Amino acid sequence: MAVTDRYGVIGHPIGHSKSPVIHRLFAAQTGEDLSYEAFDVPPEALEARLSAFVAEGLRGLNVTVPHKEAIARLVDQLTDRAHLAGAVNTVTIAVDGRLDGDNTDGVGLLTDLTANLGIELAQARVLVLGAGGATRGIVPALLGSGPRELVVANRTVERARELAGRFERLGDVAACRFDELAGRHFDLVLNATSAGLQGEVPPFPASMLTPDTVCYDLSYAMTDTPFVAWARTHGAGHVHQGWGMLVEQAAEAFFIWRGVRPDTRPVRAKLP
């Protein structure tokens, strides 16, 4: 008798994750026989739980905050894009227990921006707010799309400079502090920080927004995220949350695991 293949997502906390819903919708749509569940894994238990998942026969895992960098050090092999990012969001578990790490964040974001939202990235002036793991996951894909300018801003400029140096062979990345953005204008502003999630006002100068600016938050929520609310209030022309990126990176992971590419449209239509 055929055994249902098991998959899941690991993070801490994990209760908010929409990944189980998305992957179950993909499975129903494609007729793939699989189950998908969320596992709350605290950082100190990561290595032991990973071994347990392999022993239990899971076939793959998605990885979210705070484990993306740690998992990259624990898998047996990384794809080029995961190696570049230094972060993994998709793990494939082979029958012999071997772990392959990939990162579908960049391609998920690019698909949402270009195919779903119709945003032209070639020759665009692009700003990424934040220089953490989320930014590392998307910068290679952004550079590959041919922007006129790519700036990474961070509270401390050292971290942004370090990130720019990491990708210098792929293209030019400028680094600056948040307060150095005042009066500069961009076609696309991507928020890859957690700014505002603790209730504080996002620390970015509102003078960088114009009616032509597209603001995109990699975070998502059932209502406006703090960044989205801030961007609306200060006159950004177009504002989006990361729901589309979430669905598109999940579709890419599903394709890696199953060799079948789901149609994301009906799934995106079900989300806010």
Image (spheres, helix red, strand yellow):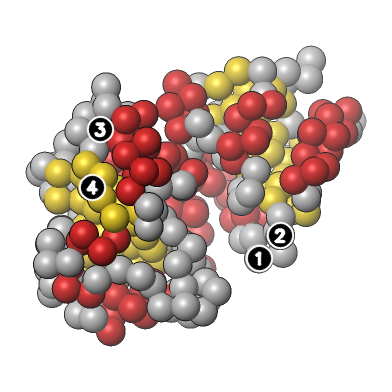
At numbered mark 2, what does the secondary structure look like: helix, strand or loop? loop
Numbered marks: total: 4
> Residue, x 74% and y 31% (percent of image)?
59
Q: Which mark is residue 13?
A: 2
What residue sits right under mark 1 in the picture?
16
Q: Amino acid at mark 4?
A: Val
Q: Nearer the viewer, residue 168 or 80?
A: 168
- Tag shown at residue 144: 3
Is the residue under label 2 in contact with that under label 1 (CB below 8 Å)? yes
At 36% from the left and 29% from the top, the residue drawn is 166
Disc 1 to disc 2, C-alpha distance:
8 Å
Q: Mark 4 — residue?
A: 151
| Residue found at x 75% / y 45% | 43
Q: Secondary structure at mark 4?
A: strand
Task: Tell me whether the residue at label 1 lies in contact with that at label 3, contact meaning CB atoms closer than 8 angstroms.
Answer: no
The quadrant holding residue 60 is top right
Q: CA distance from mark 2 to mark 3?
A: 33 Å
Q: Nearer the viewer, residue 247 or 3?
A: 247
- Label 1 Cα crowd, 10 Å radius (few <14 / some 14-19 / many 20+): few
N-terminal-most mark, 4 or 2: 2
Q: Is residue 165 above or below residue 121?
A: above
Numbered disc 1: secondary structure: loop
Residue 125 is situated, as x and y percent measured from the top left of the image, at 14, 50
Residue type pointed to by label 2? Pro
Label 3 sits on what residue type? Gly
